[in-house]
């Protein structure tokens, strides 16, 4: 006979067919706890000091493929909304009205907010591995659903797209805490910043590819678009469906690898409280990239800090811990006000400075407008977004997270002040418009060589394992709240005083939020070259206080 003690109950006495088995003496329990505590610290040191390996490359690629998909799906709508305006509206000039444009753009950030909170919590409760891949399935299904959406008398296609993009947003939101925590918990201390930055940098390539695919598709359909009826533009309908639908491909490629990635040793050790299994996982993961669970192995559940509502309130009720959560959350909120305010409305910015909509009639005008928007977004990606990520990659582990975030917010404050208060002069002539585009690209650059990268990294490092994903989800959801505020505010205010006349004041508002982000960054710790346990603000000596459960075989308590 063999029975396993439930991990939720302290072992006092175990009954079997052989009779009553007394609990281990308290002194023996303390000895075992001390040995397991030492074993835990040795295992964590092995992860923290591990050499960079192919397993780390795999983690980066698997997590990064998800972020590529996320960015592609989020920012493709920036161009697709222009296409939708030609196909499904009859206004002059052709385009979605304010509410329609706002709906398709804000649905995803709202879904992100719910997904980040939900999946962040679930990853701390049931495990990173069990949830990793589920969020990608949601993204794939919702993306495919968008591409197949149709118009009907009862439901407009814009309404259908809003629903699908909200569902897709839930999946994308789940990707943030999961990818951040998985990459941070597998990384060594000295390369953790670069690994997490490399994962997040895939977002820039996703943005770039969305614009590139749009350009290729619209160029391929150019002869047909030029011959389209100006009432329906049926071939532009093909274009936006292909653009959106291709977002499924990278997600499908990454899905298998996500489902097979091992559980992080820190989750197994600190949340499942199975130190022996975690030690084995570390050995296998760092050498072969695999893991193995022996069903007949001795299972020991240690007594260690456990997540609960009371423990959560006690931990974050201390100012030293709450200020980190607040600093991460508000900094992300302030950053996303500008990041999504610009990123999802770059076509409006380009149009406002005369580099977007074509004045030609019919199919030629439609083709040139979509092409200009696609090329403009390509230029913005190459000139600002992508270089910013990789400059962060170079300096994140040497300069540090906090200095980069402070520098980014400071520079962005200055740039938005210039673009806002000098807006009329910067858009008055062709030469001045080039200067405005340069400043806009510079803002993109310092968003990514700055707070857009660091607000993703710091929450994945600065909290205890049992709350790391939950806290990252809270921080990321705060950012998406900023994205929603930016979208609603941009849509409602941009035309005050005339078409796009209020854009300059929106840029001034962005400057204010960048300044507040600078001050919220002062609440954050510097996380470079520190282990995740050092950053948790919890004493690691005596972290394991006892043994919660053991395996009973043939009436004997099996103990190491």
Image (cartoon, helix red, strand yellow):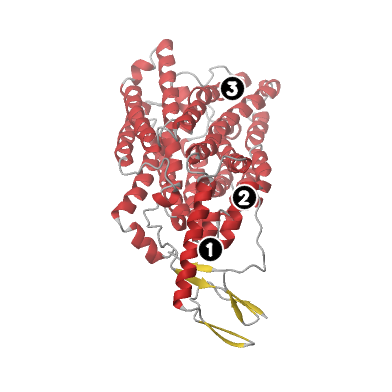
User: Mark 1 to mark 2: distance in Å?
Assistant: 18 Å
**Neighbours of disc 3 within 10 Å: few (<14), some (14-19), many (20+):** many
**Neighbours of disc 1 within 10 Å: few (<14), some (14-19), many (20+):** many
Question: Which residue is pictured at 29% across the width and 54% down the height?
Answer: 319
Disc number at residue 272?
A: 1
Disc number at residue 505?
A: none
Q: Which residue is mark 3?
A: 371
**Quarter of the picture holding the C terminus:** bottom right
* Horizontal side of residue 481 vs 171, given as left or right: left
Q: Quadrant of residue 538?
A: bottom left
Q: Which residue is mark 2?
A: 285
User: Mark 2 to mark 3: distance in Å?
Assistant: 47 Å
Nearer the camera: disc 2 or disc 3: 2
Judge by depth and name the residue closer to the eye, 307 or 167: 307
Q: Position of residue 477 (x, y in %)?
A: 44, 48
Residue 134 visible in rendering? no
Work out whether mark 1 precedes mark 2 in sequence or the reverse, and give the earlier one: 1
Q: Position of residue 128 (x, y in %)?
A: 55, 54
Nearer the camera: disc 1 or disc 2: 2
SS assignment at label 1: loop
Q: Position of residue 1 (x, y in %)?
A: 68, 81
Question: Which residue is pictured at 62% across the width and 37% down the height?
Answer: 244
SS assignment at label 3: helix
In the rendered structure, are the residues bearing label 1 and label 2 in contact, judged by CB atoms less than 8 Å apart?
Answer: no
Work out whether mark 3 precedes mark 1 in sequence or the reverse, and give the earlier one: 1
């Amino acid at each position: 006979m063999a029975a396993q003690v439930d991990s939720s109950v302290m072992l006092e006495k175990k009954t079997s067919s052989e009779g009553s088995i007394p609990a281990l003496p308290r002194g023996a329990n303390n000895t075992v706890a001390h040995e397991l505590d030492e074993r835990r610290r040795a295992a964590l040191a092995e992860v923290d000091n591990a050499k960079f390996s192919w397993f780390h490359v795999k983690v980066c690629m698997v997590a990064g493929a998800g972020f590529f998909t996320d960015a592609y799906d989020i920012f493709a709508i920036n161009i697709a909304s222009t296409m939708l305006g030609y196909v499904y509206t009859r206004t002059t000039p052709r385009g979605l009205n304010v509410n329609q444009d706002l709906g398709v753009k804000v649905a995803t950030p709202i879904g992100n907010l719910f997904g980040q909170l939900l999946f962040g919590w679930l990853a701390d409760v049931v495990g990173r591995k069990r949830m990793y891949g589920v969020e990608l399935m949601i993204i794939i299904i919702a993306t495919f659903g968008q591409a197949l959406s149709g118009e009907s008398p009862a439901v407009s296609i814009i309404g259908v797209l809003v629903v699908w993009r909200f569902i897709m947003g839930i999946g994308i939101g789940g990707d943030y805490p999961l990818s951040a925590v998985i990459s941070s918990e597998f990384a060594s201390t000295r390369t953790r910043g670069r690994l997490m930055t490399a994962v997040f940098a895939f977002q820039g390539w996703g943005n770039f590819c969305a614009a590139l695919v749009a350009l290729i598709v619209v160029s391929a359909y150019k002869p047909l678009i030029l011959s389209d009826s100006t009432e329906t533009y049926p071939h532009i309908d093909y274009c936006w469906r292909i653009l959106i639908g291709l977002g499924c491909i990278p997600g499908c490629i990454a899905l298998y690898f996500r489902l097979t990635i091992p559980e992080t040793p820190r989750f197994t050790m600190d949340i499942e409280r199975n130190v022996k299994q975690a030690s084995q996982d570390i050995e296998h993961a760092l050498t072969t990239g695999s893991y193995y669970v022996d069903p007949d192995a001795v299972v020991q559940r240690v007594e260690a800090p456990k997540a609960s509502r009371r423990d959560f309130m006690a931990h974050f009720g201390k100012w030293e811990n709450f200020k980190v959560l607040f600093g991460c959350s508000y900094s992300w909120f302030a950053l996303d006000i500008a990041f999504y305010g610009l990123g999802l409305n770059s076509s409006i910015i380009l149009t406002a400075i005369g580099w977007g909509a074509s004045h030609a009639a019919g199919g030629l005008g439609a083709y040139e407008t979509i092409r200009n928007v696609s090329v403009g977004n390509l230029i913005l990606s190459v000139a600002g977004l992508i270089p910013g990520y990789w400059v962060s990659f170079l300096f994140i582990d040497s300069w540090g997270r906090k200095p980069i975030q402070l520098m980014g917010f400071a520079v962005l404050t200055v740039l938005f002040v210039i673009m806002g208060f000098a807006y009329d002069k910067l858009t008055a002539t062709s030469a001045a418009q080039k200067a405005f585009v340069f400043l806009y690209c510079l803002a993109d650059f310092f968003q990514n060589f700055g707070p857009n990268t660091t607000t993703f990294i710091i929450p994945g490092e600065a909290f205890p394992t049992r709350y790391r994903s939950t806290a990252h989800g809270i921080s990321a959801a705060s950012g998406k709240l900023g994205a929603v505020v930016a979208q609603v505010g941009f849509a409602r205010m941009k035309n005050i005083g005339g078409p796009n006349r209020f854009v300059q004041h929106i840029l001034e508002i962005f400057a204010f939020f960048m300044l507040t982000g600078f001050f919220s960054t002062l609440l954050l710790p510097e996380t470079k070259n520190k282990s995740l346990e050092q950053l948790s603000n919890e004493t690691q000596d005596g972290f394991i206080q006892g043994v919660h459960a053991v395996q009973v075989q043939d009436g004997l308590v099996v103990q190491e």
